[in-house]
Image: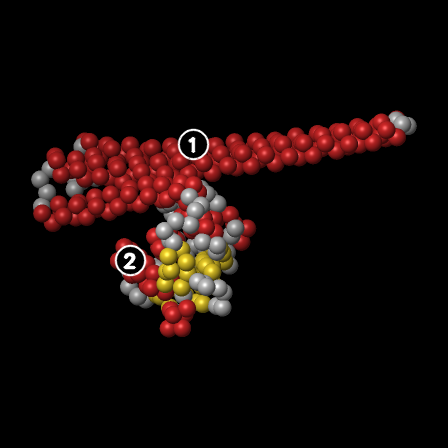
């Protein structure tokens, strides 16, 4: 690689500088958009409260001034409709503003997830084109480029998978699936992908649970669910990975519990983390991602007549996700 003081003279170095400048500009724009939307939400809430107060005042005046019972009843009904309409309209506006905010966050995250590895690939390709590098350095560049290509593929697959689980509700390609065997497979894949040992990513279940852990479902979708839960636990453990995957079996359900000791989740956001595009907490927003992984997990779980729950003692105190699936034949 070139010395730091000389890289700006090379196209690759200039590209990296432009990438960092673009990222800073995007984050600044996103912060301004969030502030503007919060102001808009506050405006609509104040407007609704004011209109409701005026409507109540007019209704009281109507009651005092009018002596006809029919006029009184009609007036009360009309003003009740006005108040209900104002409240519903405000709720709609606030939800739309928040939805647009989530969409903007998603676009920003996806753009970052696509642009960063592309810029990295171009950087190393231009370096290989314009400079003579040793074979060891060349192999290192190839390894990094392969990792960037995998990151691009994963981002595209996440977006496509999110669209697929929303559109596809039918029980296609369902068959009996042993969740203990599938969990073992996914844990091993996660260890290899993130280069982790058994002490960092442990899998626990007894032989009784293994024999009773049969469910009916699409094995590829269930594999996606487990992979997303494991990758999510590893990704949000920046200070050190200590993840456990545990399989339990009850009379009616198969439970898979994935726990980590990572950045945690604020209590108020435990249900929101499964919404599409939603990313919660300042510490979690620092980690790359599209905000689709847990949404996909929730959608697949419900499609299989199950559910997924999140637990956390708060930010910085880890999180546990429990997947509930009905046992086969129960």
The local secondary structure at tag 2 comes to helix
Query: Where on the picture, by quarter, is residue 68?
Result: top right
The local secondary structure at tag 1 comes to helix
In the image, residue 124 above or below residue 63: below
x, y percentage for residue 250? 48, 68
x, y percentage for residue 324? 47, 59
Tell me the distance, in whole angstroms, between the alpha carbons under discs 1 and 2: 38 Å
Of the numbered discs in the image, which one, if any, rests on residue 29? 1
Tell me whether the residue at label 1 lies in contact with that at label 2, contact meaning CB atoms closer than 8 angstroms: no
Q: Determine the residue positioned at 40% across, 40% down.
A: 163
In the image: residue 196, left or right of residue 39? left
Question: Outermost residue toward the bottom?
Answer: 207
- For mark 2, what is the residue? 189
Please name whichever residue, 226 or 242, is drawn nearer the observer in this view of the structure. Answer: 226
Quadrant where the N terminus lies?
A: top left
x, y percentage for residue 21? 33, 33
Q: Determine the residue positioned at 29% across, 58% down.
A: 189
Q: Determine the residue positioned at 24% across, 39% down.
A: 120
Q: Residues within 10 Å of mark 2 (few under 14, many from 20)?
A: some
Q: Determine the residue positioned at 40% across, 55% down.
A: 217
Q: Residues within 10 Å of mark 1 (few under 14, many from 20)?
A: few
In the image, residue 143 above or below residue 37: below
Comes first in the chain, label 1 or label 2: 1
- The answer to whether any part of residue 286 appears in the image is no
Q: Nearer the viewer, mark 1 or mark 2?
A: 2
How many numbered dots are placed on residues in this image? 2
Query: Where on the picture, by quarter, is residue 244?
Result: bottom left
Question: Outermost residue toward the right?
Answer: 67
């Amino acid at each position: 690689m070139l010395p730091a003081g000389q890289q700006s003279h090379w196209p690759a170095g200039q590209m990296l500088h432009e990438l960092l400048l673009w990222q800073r500009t995007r984050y600044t724009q996103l912060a301004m958009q969030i502030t503007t939307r919060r102001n808009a939400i506050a405006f609509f809430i104040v407007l609704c409260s004011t209109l409701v107060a005026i409507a109540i005042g007019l209704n009281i005046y109507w009651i005092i001034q009018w002596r006809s019972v029919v006029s009184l009843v009609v007036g009360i009904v009309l003003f009740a409709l006005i108040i209900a309409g104002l409240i519903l309209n405000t709720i709609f506006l606030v939800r739309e503003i928040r939805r647009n905010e989530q969409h903007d966050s998603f676009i920003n995250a996806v753009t970052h997830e696509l642009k960063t590895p592309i810029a990295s690939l171009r950087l190393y390709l231009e370096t290989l084109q314009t400079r003579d590098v040793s074979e060891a350095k060349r192999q290192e560049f190839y390894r990094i480029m392969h990792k960037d290509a995998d990151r691009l593929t994963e981002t595209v697959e996440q977006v496509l998978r999110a669209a697929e689980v929303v559109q596809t509700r039918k029980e296609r390609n369902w068959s009996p699936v042993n969740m203990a065997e599938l969990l073992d497979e996914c844990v091993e894949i996660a260890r290899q992908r993130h280069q982790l040992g058994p002490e960092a990513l442990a899998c626990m279940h007894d032989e009784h649970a293994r024999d009773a852990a049969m469910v009916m479902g699409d094995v590829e979708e269930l594999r996606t669910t487990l992979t997303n839960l494991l990758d999510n636990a590893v990704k949000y453990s920046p200070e050190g990975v200590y993840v456990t995957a545990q399989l339990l079996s009850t009379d009616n359900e198969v439970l898979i519990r994935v726990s980590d000791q990572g950045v945690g989740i604020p209590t108020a956001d435990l249900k929101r983390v499964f919404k599409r595009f939603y990313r919660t907490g300042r510490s979690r927003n620092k980690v790359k991602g599209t905000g689709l992984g847990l949404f996909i997990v929730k959608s697949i779980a419900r499609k299989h007549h199950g559910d997924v729950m999140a637990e956390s003692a708060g930010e910085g105190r880890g999180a546990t996700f429990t997947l509930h699936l009905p046992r086969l034949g129960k």
